[in-house]
Image (tube, rainbow, N blue to C red):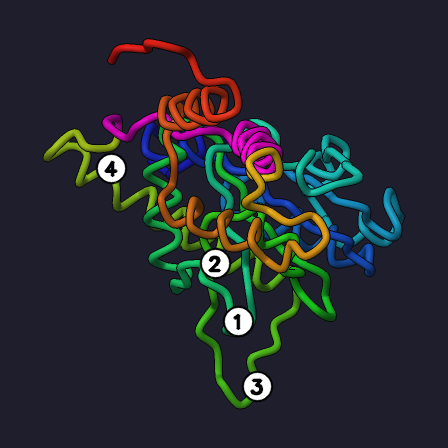
């Protein structure tokens, strides 16, 4: 019997979305859709594409035009990540950031575990410059395709194909592990990225209120705090707990007993 996306071990692929940010060439969108469909992924999000819909995209999608028809176009990356519990930013180079940086195979393993119960996003930047630091602030993990260091430039659709392939192979392998130890369904409920954004806004307002954050010289305090929390991979209940602390920091209760 041939494998298909209805196989139990591949159902988690439905929980992935591929997010392309500010794509300049419509052909890359169509080729990325084709790459996704060959590996069983179906949810395509486009953040401010320069040309979409476009006949060139449809032509290069070949049999994956349905992914283009159902693609969700947003004006911001935050919108595209709404509802996701985890976002992996794809990068072609090392950066001076405190994000955890792993290869795509390691990233796929982390992503498959979370996607067994919650949505996960794969975030790709522009063809010329990749993801900006501001876009990476929305991600919890940075992944790199370990290509030839003398010529590491990959076409956008090729990068999508490699990551989707790694996800598919990891999902197939993970089923054997799950049969032995039943670990796939024990992952915690992580906070969604939009709830994290709400927490960061709450945190910034609180730091301004208590005078820790100087609005005239903020430097990179909020960026650094975001990256601390990205490494922590907060759960839903933990975000609620932290927001409760922020609320009481601004308006403390008297004689509060715990």
Badge 2 element? strand
Q: Nearer the viewer, mark 2 or mark 4?
A: 2
Question: What residue do we see at 33% from left, 49% from top?
Answer: 109
Q: Nearer the viewer, mark 1 or mark 3?
A: 1
Q: Position of residue 112 (x, y in %)?
A: 36, 41
Mark 2 or 4 closer to N-term?
2
Residue 151 - label: 3
Separation (CA) of disc 1 from disc 2: 10 Å
Mark 1 or 2 closer to N-term?
1
Mark 2 or 3 closer to N-term?
2
Crowding at mark 4 (Cα within 10 Å: few <14, some 14-19, many 20+):
some
Q: Nearer the viewer, residue 213 or 7?
A: 213
Q: Nearer the viewer, residue 117 or 77?
A: 77
Q: Which residue is mark 2?
A: 142
Q: Nearer the viewer, residue 207 or 86?
A: 207
Q: Chief secondary structure of the magenta span?
A: helix
Q: Position of residue 117 (x, y in %)?
A: 38, 26
Q: Given contact means CB atoms under 8 Å apart, are the residues at marks 2 and 3 in contact? A: no
Separation (CA) of disc 2 from disc 4: 25 Å
Separation (CA) of disc 1 from disc 3: 17 Å
Separation (CA) of disc 4 from disc 3: 36 Å
Q: Which residue is mark 4?
A: 175
Quadrant containing the C terminus in the rendered view: top left
Q: Which residues are magenta?
A: 185-206
Residue 95 - label: 1
Question: What residue do we see at 82% from left, 59% from top?
Answer: 24
Query: In the image, is residue 63 above or below residue 221?
Result: above
């Amino acid at each position: 019997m041939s494998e298909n996306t209805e196989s139990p071990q591949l159902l988690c692929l439905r929980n992935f979305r591929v997010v392309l940010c500010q794509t300049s060439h419509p052909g890359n969108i169509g080729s990325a859709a084709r790459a996704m469909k060959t590996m069983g992924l179906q949810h395509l999000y486009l953040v401010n594409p320069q040309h979409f819909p476009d006949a060139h995209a449809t032509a290069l999608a070949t049999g994956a035009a349905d992914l283009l028809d159902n693609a969700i176009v947003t004006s911001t990356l935050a919108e595209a990540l709404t509802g996701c519990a985890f976002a992996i930013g794809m990068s072609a180079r090392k950066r001076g950031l405190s994000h955890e940086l792993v290869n795509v195979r390691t990233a796929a393993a982390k992503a498959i575990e979370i996607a067994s119960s919650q949505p996960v996003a794969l975030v790709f930047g522009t063809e010329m410059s990749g993801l900006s630091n501001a876009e990476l602030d929305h991600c919890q993990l940075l992944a790199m395709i370990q290509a030839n260091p003398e010529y590491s430039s990959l076409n956008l659709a090729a990068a999508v194909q490699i990551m989707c392939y790694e996800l598919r192979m990891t999902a197939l392998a993970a089923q054997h592990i799950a049969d032995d130890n039943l670990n796939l369904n024990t992952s915690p409920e992580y906070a969604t990225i939009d709830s994290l954004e709400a927490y960061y806004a709450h945190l910034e307002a609180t730091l301004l209120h208590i005078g820790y954050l100087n609005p005239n010289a903020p430097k990179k305090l909020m960026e650094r705090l975001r990256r601390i929390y990205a490494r922590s991979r907060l759960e839903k209940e933990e975000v609620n707990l932290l927001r409760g602390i922020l609320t009481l920091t601004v308006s403390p209760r008297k004689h509060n007993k715990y």
